[in-house]
Image (tube, grey):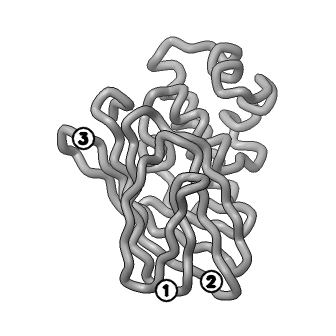
Amino acid sequence: MDEHSLVTLGQHLQALRKAQDLSLSQLANAAGIAKSNLCRLEQGNGNPTLDTIWRLAVQLNVPFGTLVAPISVPLGEDGVQVQLIDQGKGASQVDAYWMRCAPHTLRHAEAHTPGTQETLTLISGYLEAGPEGATLSLAPGDSVTFPADQPHLYRTQAAEATLLLTVTYGLEGTRS
């Protein structure tokens, strides 16, 4: 992530934390990260992982897209890139992402908030995705919806995979 994006993310994260009257220690402990790492992140330093950003969003009770909305560059690590495309404004919070997985990628995703579902539409390549132990194989044009409030994974073979990812949060799960 470039310096401007890190600073923007840090400022937004700090504003969300303060709006909920949470201390650095409270949020860091709840998200399972070191207070010093959260402090550096809010100052626009460091290089947060996707899992760290997800855990912070969950603890702030906001959709991942709400936390990263001010950032216009893809976020990525270990062969996976995601970029927020849009957020819905209906009764259910819906985030839409573009996602790319490099060849031979295995990405384990932590459980999201209760009631969350993901819908994937594969654009190119080959992808195995879904809850751990119950994944499905996708070819270009295939779509799948699965509960994302349990650990799940994305796995590619020899080719890169690109997809559209829609995350629909449970009504009780988050606020915008």
Label ID, residue 92: 3
CA–CA distance between discs 1 and 3? 28 Å
Residue at image position (62%, 13%) is 23
Mark 1 vs 2: CB contact within 8 A: yes
Mark 2 vs 3: CB contact within 8 A: no
Of helix, strand and loop, which one carries label 3?
loop
Relative to 136, say whether 51 is above or below: above
Q: Position of residue 15 (x, y in %)?
A: 50, 28
Q: Amino acid at mark 2?
A: Glu
Q: Name the image quarter holding the C terminus.
A: top left
Mark nearer the N terminus (1 vs 3): 3
Label ID, residue 124: 1
Residue at image position (72%, 30%) is 38
Residue at image position (77%, 23%) is 35
Q: Quadrant of residue 125?
A: bottom right
CA–CA distance between discs 2 and 3? 31 Å
Q: Report the residue marked by disc 2.
A: 160
CA–CA distance between discs 1 and 2? 8 Å
Residue 98 or residue 121, whichever sits in front: 121
Q: Position of residue 30 (x, y in %)?
A: 64, 20
Mark nearer the N terminus (1 vs 2): 1
Residue at image position (78%, 45%) is 46
Q: Amino acid at mark 1?
A: Ser
Q: Name the image quarter holding the N terminus.
A: bottom right
